[in-house]
Amino acid sequence: MPSRSLPKLINLIRGWPAPSLLASELLSSAAQRVLSDPVTFVSALQYGPDPGHQPLREALAQWLGRHYGVEPDPGRICISGGASQNLACILQSFTDPNYTRAVWMLAPCYHLACDIFEDSGFKQRLRAFPEDEEGVDLEALERGIQKLEKEQAKVQRTSYKDPGKYRKHYRHIIYAVPTCANPSGKTMTLARRNGLVELARKYDALIICDDVYDCLQWPMNGNLTPPSEWPPEMKLPRLCDIDLAMGQAEGDPRGFGYAVSNGSFSKIVGPGIRTGWAEGSRAFALGLAQTGSTKSGGSPSQLCAAMMAELLSSGELENHLEKIVRPSLQRRHALMMDAIHKHLPSSDFKIRESGLPGAKVYGGYFVWLTLNGGLSAQTVGDVAQREENLIIGSGDMFQVHGDEDVLSFDSAIRLTYSWESEEDIVEGIRRLGDVIRKIKERPAGGRHEETEQHVPTLQVLVGLGVPRVATLVVTVQLLCLAFNRKG
């Protein structure tokens, strides 16, 4: 009997903006303006100052100051080559693999951050801690830190690296996505944000916050308003601002602080821009600018930084967010949620309807769906790939590397609504419902064979953007080397 031909590929794992969300025309116009005037193109094409392109620092300070209701201060901002590059620079400047005890990651976590921490000397020292409905589980995190401190009480630790007078080495690192988290979609409550900063001050920990989705929020009632009219639950303070408002801690005489905001233009303009920013205390921003790779090559993304300064100063970027990006994401999220409730029986899953408890708001790129009845997300993903040409993110992808036994997410699925077309979002969820139904109808003994007969690596590779080619071996070999996974 001839096999059924597969339908078109639908990729619900790729955490990229759809092509329609990319600000190509705005970038073209900004580039022309920057490169046509010697006043701007000379500085844009030269090595940049260590803290970054000053017009962008000033424009960001004004924009972020309005959004978060804080006093604009360019001195708190350091321009980066995007959130991932900035995370690496923070670790280079403010951690030491011998002195810094551990990296504490809120789980489920943004999985690709694990590689950055491991490259910085923290392999086998990544520690998972759980979240609850309000975000970070503070009691579990503190128990973990206390246990580790007790175990290492007699270990003499000195720094391999010399931080110099502009930097320090933190005892612990805490990594989280406080707003519209990747992958869970949760937003941390104000009480938990305050509590996390207090805990970081108590244990000399630096909280690194990926704040890349803060501006991508919307009310679930369908009424979009400009940020100046957003309700308080959509403008929760960043942890770096909470830390600053608490005043300089006694154990922090040089005023580095205990939280840094890691921002990026990737989700709001386009990932290829590779430009972002860090915002913390003035001392922290100055110290970050001393990172060796920055001092050697100058501020990263100098040309793109000049273009971003143009878009922010002119108001074009905010207009793009309000007219294009947020309405599209709001519509895509609503379509996905409607499709889930239509095509998946309510008894088969649990899902977070709102990003913040007690509020009708959502944002970001992702929906986190938990399967009921003992269904394995890995099995569902394998069958979906093989029989429906549908790529989904099984929950165990988002475990903390080296600490997988602490928290398992085999019953969870991450679904992305930012990449595929609106029609394919709905079709993808319909296929997912069919897959779950078929698995439940099959004999229980055959379900595990499904997984064993399939190579999970192919699902992940294709899901992260690997093109389909005739030879599987060539696909795996070439694309493991060449494809840069993101999202």
Image: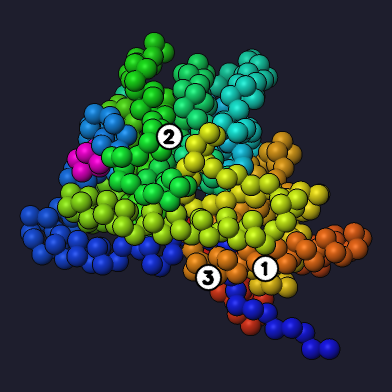
Q: CA distance from mark 2 to mark 1?
A: 35 Å
Residue 423's label in the rendered image is: 3
Which mark sits nearer the N-terminus, 1 or 3? 3
How many C-alpha atoms fall within 10 Å of the one at disc 2: few (<14), some, or many (≥20)? some
Q: Give, as a three-letter code, the residue at label 2.
A: Glu
Residue receiving disc 2: 233
Q: Is residue 314 left or right of residue 84?
A: left
How many C-alpha atoms fall within 10 Å of the one at disc 1: few (<14), some, or many (≥20)? some
Magenta stretch? Answer: 58-63
Q: Is residue 84 above or below residue 136?
A: below
> Which is more toward the observer, 367 or 25?
367
Q: Is residue 384 above or below residue 189?
A: below
Q: Give, as a three-letter code, the residue at label 3.
A: Glu
Asked if one can make out residue 96 in the rendered structure from this viewpoint, the answer is no
Residue receiving disc 1: 431
Q: Is residue 254 left or right of residue 233?
A: left
Q: Quadrant of the N terminus?
A: bottom right
Q: CA distance from mark 1 to mark 3?
A: 12 Å
Q: Tell me residue 46's x, y (percent).
A: 18, 54
Q: Tell me residue 77's x, y (percent).
A: 28, 36
Residue 167 falls in image quadrant: top left
Q: Main secondary structure of the magenta part?
A: helix
